[in-house]
Amino acid sequence: MFTAIAHRGDNRRFTENTRAAFDSSLEHGFTALELDLVRIKDGTVVLFHDDTLERLCGVSLNARDLTYHQFKAAFPELLTLYEFMALYGRNDLSLNFEIKGDRYTFAGVEPYLSFCTDPLISSFDLDLMRDVRAAGLPAGFLVHTGPELLSVLRDFPGARIHASHELVPLLYGLQSALAAGNHTVYLYTVNQPAHADYLAGLPFISGVFTDNSEFGRRYAHSEITSTGDSNENRSVSEPFLRTPDAAVEFVA
């Protein structure tokens, strides 16, 4: 099974991490959503990706230094995690909570997990993810570099890995290790249908995070499976396998 996960909702048509973006993703057939969470000054957990409000609001305020009312005044579309759960915390959705921050943010998120049928915590913070895994909670290890990937493979058997698309050439060469360690791999961020089709045929890729709303009906919990081709039957001239630099071209 190959799954498409809506990356911050339908962020091409609507502001990321907002109700409009998530509603659009659901309308397009997605059953898996990814969202970014940060705990701000007054302890409220809100959906927001960046450290500052510069990109989305045009003001150079630090997100963590604001109270909810200050944040809402600058960004009226702001959702709290409580509001998100009231809207989307239902049985038929897979929810990927990416922690932007540290244990302080996670402590504010953890109580909500029991209200989800299929929750997952992800982060680039390896120490935090170690704690999440030790607590027996579903964990997705975000990695952007080769050393980060190898560290997770070595130290966390059976881990779910959320890897940059740029690591596909390295992942291709690590298929035996991935299988031996019982790892699953999801790639971020893949937006071109031809590239996702190719990845869906690789036995070591379980899905992609995408900004492309058309992937909802095309891939969300689809029955696309690997062709089972051996390494010998795949040409190194195929997408993503030429060089790590070439792989960058395959994400819009």
Image (cartoon, helix red, strand yellow):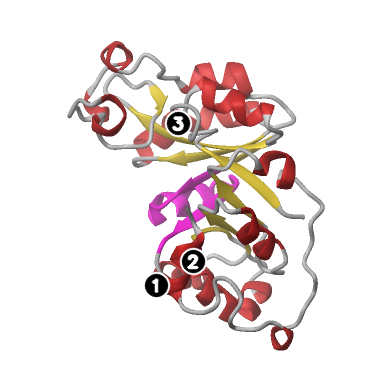
Q: Nearer the viewer, mark 3 or mark 1?
A: 3
The kind of secondary structure element at disc 2 is helix
Q: Which residues are magenta?
A: 121-144
Q: Residue at x 70, y 61 (%)?
A: 200
The residue pinned by badge 3 equals: 16
Mark 2 neighbour class, 10 Å CA radius: few under 14, some 14 to 19, many 20 or more: some
Instruction: State whether residue 174 appears in this view.
Output: no
Magenta stretch containing residue 10, yes or no? no
Residue 71 percent across, percent down from the top left: 29, 18
Looking at the image, which residue is at 28% across and 24% down?
57
Compare residues 238 and 184 and report the one nearer the observer: 238
Q: In percent of the image, x 69 and y 24: which residue is there?
A: 90
User: If you read the primary sequence from the N terminus, does the residue marked by circle 1 or circle 2 appear first?
Assistant: 1
Q: Is residue 69 visible?
A: yes
Lower sequence index among marks 3 and 2? 3
Where is 229 relative to 126, above or below?
below
Q: Give the residue pinned by disc 2.
A: 152
- Tell me the distance, in whole angstroms, between the alpha carbons under discs 1 and 2: 9 Å
Image-based side of 11 in relation to 73, left or right:
right
Q: Nearer the viewer, residue 157 or 18?
A: 18
Please name the amino acid that badge 3 sits on.
Answer: Glu
Q: Residue 31, relative to residue 186: is it above or below?
A: above
SS of the residue at dot 3? loop
Specify the amino acid type for callout 2: Val
Q: Pick whichever of labels 3 and 1 is earlier in the sequence.
A: 3
Horizontal and vertical percent position of residue 7:
53, 41
Given residues 77 and 212, the one toward you in this image is 212
Q: CA distance from mark 3 to mark 2?
A: 29 Å
C-alpha span from label 3 to label 1: 30 Å
Q: Residues within 10 Å of mark 3 (few under 14, many from 20)?
A: many
Residue that mark 1 sits on: 147
Q: What residue occupies the far bottom of the structure in this picture?
A: 232
